[in-house]
Amino acid sequence: MVTLTIDGVEVKAPAGSTVLEAAKLAGIRIPTLCYLKGINEIGACRICVVDVGARSLQAACVYPVSEGLKVVTNSPKVREARKVTLELILSNHERTCLTCVRSGNCELQQLANELNVGEIRFDGERTDLPVDDLSPSVVRDPNKCVLCRRCISVCNNVQSVAAIGTAERGFKTVIASPFNMALKDTPCVNCGQCINVCPVGALREKSSIEKVWDALANPDLHVVVQTAPAVRVAIGEEFGLPIGTRCTGKMVAALKRLGFDKVFDTDTGADLTIMEEGNELIQRIKNGGKLPMITSCSPGWIKFCEHNYPDLLDNLSTCKSPQNMFGALLKSYYAEKMGIDPSKIFVVSVMPCTAKKFEIQRPELASTGYPDVDVSITTRELARMIKEAGIDFVNLPDEEFDDPMGEASGAGVIFGATGGVMEAALRTVVDKLTGRDNDNIEYKEVRGEEGIKVAEVTLPDGMTIRAAVAHGLGNARKLLDQVRNGEAQYHFIEIMACPGGCVNGGGQPIQPARVRNTIDIRTERAKGLYSEDEAMTIRKSHKNPRIQKIYEEFLGEPGSHKAHELLHTHYYA
Ligand code: HC0
Ligand code: SF4
């Protein structure tokens, strides 16, 4: 510990910490803009400057504490320096706040308010750059960019994709893709993590809201919606509820009020995925198939694999993602059952994910002759629709998913957290391999935020299933390099593109740095999913009566010809 004084207050802080961290311990808030704990700690924007008695003011987010250091965070000189910096940023900012997607949730707006910026004294030259909206998932508007570099850090350091970086110098500096390519032409995996860390409206999802309104207004269409596991524990944040609040019933009620003909649960698709993926794993183990088998439900991960590990494409499970399995089933089984022509069924998915917008466009995912899913919107877009429709979300009653596709198990629910797919799969695979209804269904080794998690399950016949889980593509890269080099042997690997899994997907409500710097939002949202699983009576996919019925009435057995036609696919390099 070192002792320093901040604004005359004596503070003890761990050696190696920064002035920003020490100030926090003393209850002193230093304003920041580019700083994002654990992701972007580079002192780029200089909003957090403080006086440490040196020749120039220093950035608190990178300045280390030392014994006897005297720091002043609040003096006319410090306040003026911060204000000038902010006014310079604002002078070249497209200030269309009223119509900006981040209005009300913009860290720059908040900062201007807090620093009491009443006028911008330096209105001068402006950059006017084209907006890149060619990606199916991400829109980049450089005119709103504040050059904080959070997006670069998350893309490079966390995701190890490096689709964006800085280009040019001085006033002309921009964040861009190599050779100024459109994002769609780069190895960008559409994960949207850059959107979630952007403090302003420079990055946003490609909105599909109007397509959904149009479908809902079209009397010729039967418009159904499916909601991903992670949406239910995050959407409440858009309406002021605490992070991780379970809002399943209210979400369903809101969707019914928006006018969807049926409201279904992607978790049912997740149960179906476990039936197919579990069967595929058992077959590969028994018949000497390609191992390790790797999950294929995260579309950001699939694209990453195609770009970076084409040699491992045969290791991917051939299962489509739950979103697409469920969509294919809606346009076949459900269409047949309800007597509706599949061409008239319009499937909307609500996902915590921006890469799902890319996934639904993949030509190989249209096995009924129609796209499995017609439009995919994010949690944020759904919240916008609910607000636009004037629905009082917080005071809605809880309502149930619709028959005949509405039932899901707890295994389907936990898909939304890292390790969830693995845990759900183990619940089924262990039962199938032992021929018993095992009680031990919580695989805590694969839960939590450790970057790479490993579990071993030894069966009564002595066989050990070796499983590994990675979340965030930087972690996936580490694990896959071990697999590639033969340093690690597993039967089954779960990979989710986003750190924390879907609960922290690129389409989830955006929490500002001041929240993310103090709370692990991934853990809070995951807790919501695990508690929903605990509250369910059916917690194994193969015990879900709805799933059993779908196999009985339509698919036959897991891995059947029909299941392969509708629920499986192949990816290409
Ligand atoms: Fe996920 Fe999914 S769990 S990818 O994270 O597998 O997006 O929530 O919907 O499809 O079910 C996202 C979340 C899903 C799918 C499911 C899987
Ligand atoms: Fe990088 Fe993901 Fe953003 Fe693409 S969507 S630029 S991969 S962070």
Image (spheres, rainbow, N blue to C red):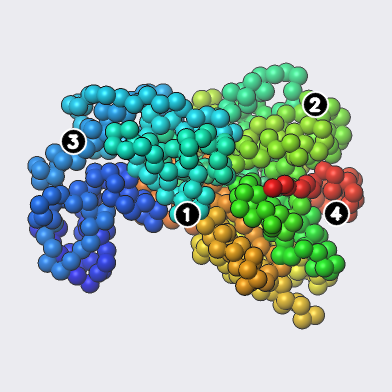
> Which amino acid type is marked by label 3?
Val
Q: Nearer the viewer, residue 261 or 325?
A: 325
From the viewer's perspective, tell me whether residue 321 is left or right of residue 398: right
Q: Earlier in the sequence, mark 3 or mark 2?
A: 3
Looking at the image, which residue is at 43% across and 30% down? 141
Asked if disc 2 is less than 8 Å from ligand 1, the answer is no
> Which amino acid type is marked by label 1?
Val
Q: Earlier in the sequence, mark 2 or mark 1?
A: 1
Q: Position of residue 148 (x, y in %)?
A: 34, 42
From the viewer's perspective, tell me whether residue 402 is left or right of residue 516: right
Alpha-carbon distance for marks 1 and 4?
36 Å
**Secondary-structure class at tag 1:** helix
Q: Which residue is mark 1?
A: 158
**Secondary-structure class at tag 4:** loop
Q: Which residue is mark 2?
A: 343
Q: Nearer the viewer, mark 3 or mark 2?
A: 3
Q: Which residue is mark 4?
A: 559
| Marks 3,4: beta carbons within 8 A | no
| Marks 1,4: beta carbons within 8 A | no
Q: Earlier in the sequence, mark 1 or mark 3?
A: 3
Q: Position of residue 306 (x, y in %)?
A: 65, 49
Q: Nearer the viewer, mark 1 or mark 4?
A: 1
Looking at the image, which residue is at 13% across and 63% down? 69
Alpha-carbon distance for marks 3 and 4?
64 Å
**Secondary-structure class at tag 3:** helix
* Mark 1 surroundings: few (<14), some (14-19) or many (≥20) residues within 10 A: some
Q: Which residue is mark 3?
A: 84
* Mark 2 surroundings: few (<14), some (14-19) or many (≥20) residues within 10 A: some
Looking at the image, which residue is at 37% across and 44% down? 149
**Secondary-structure class at tag 2:** helix
